[in-house]
Amino acid sequence: MFGSNSLHGWKILSVFIFFNLYHHFKEQRTEQNVNRVEICLSNDLIMRKDEWNAPIIIPEHNIILWVIPKVGSTILKRFVARIYNYNNWRHGWFHGPSTNHFKRLYQYNASKVTDMMTSRKWVKIIFLRDPYKRLKSAYKDKNKQKGPKFTKTNKTYIETVCGYRPENFTVFVKMINNGCKDPHWDPQMHLIDKKWLKHITFWGRLDHFCKDFKRITLKLHLWNMYGASGWNEKNGSICESTTPHQNKKNKIEVIDLPESIYNRYELDKKMLAPDI
């Protein structure tokens, strides 16, 4: 029915059509992968019903703020309290659920959180600290605090959490290796799932808190109203305010740590890289 030339022509046309269809579907699938968004699940880390450490929402400014223990948490929560218009924002203690009523991320359903975490309209902010300095700071701070204000007993905080009081920092590290967990010394990255890291808008560092805080609040038009003044008796900025562990002049020296500790905080250290 067909001559050899016609058959040859049909073969060429068939191959041409096949490759065009193949590349079309390949490009379509690639585009779908590029545009794919993460889905929030009810068991995500960011959805934990933790009234002490769950991400804080500042709805009127579309801000999601991670306030990590031992990473300027006192001053950051006072900043939030000021935006929430709390009368005692400058001197208040806002760490526990009984002393603050901040909106938390887990109070939204998973579908809404997916939209918030993937939308550019929402600003996601995290401040981090060198994990080893944070670990030593947790030891110095939580191994000396006593009284009912913190533990409802005369025990130190570490003693209450871990069962006994470490005689030195080395013993404290061993306690952590043996399974003593607490948000004050758990890895900072335990408060956020890896899939959400690329959606974080701003990464700040405690070792240059003032510069980073001013940069992001200026961008959000919050510096002049909430950061530039009113933070001490001299009407200074947030950079001139003091908190219990930021006011110490002594440097925190970190001794050699076991390999297991370096592995434990590996992601924390990685996220402190200069290019974040």
Image (spheres, grey):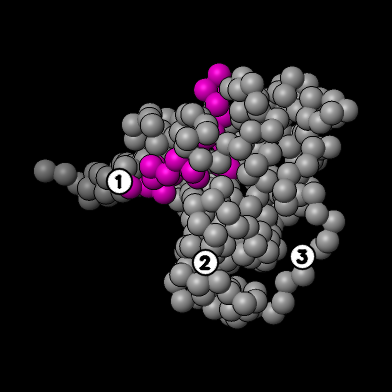
State which quadrant residue 50 falls in: top left
User: Outermost residue, right direction?
Assistant: 234
Q: Which residue is mark 3?
A: 252
Q: CA distance from mark 2 to mark 3?
A: 22 Å
**In the depicted structure, whether residue 171 falls above or below residue 231:** below
Q: Residue at x 42, y 30 (%)?
A: 115
- Assign a secondary structure to mark 3: loop
Q: For the residues carrying marks 2 and 3, which lies nearer the camera in this image?
A: 2
**In the depicted structure, whether residue 190 falls above or below residue 262:** above
- Amino acid type at mark 2: Glu
Q: CA distance from mark 2 to mark 1?
A: 70 Å
Residue 58 at x, y percent in the picture:
55, 26
Q: Which residue is mark 2?
A: 159
Front residue of 94/28: it is 94
Residue 273 at x, y percent in the picture:
69, 57
Q: Is residue 233 left or right of residue 173?
A: right
Q: Which residue is mark 1?
A: 18
Q: Residue at x 69, y 79 (%)?
A: 256
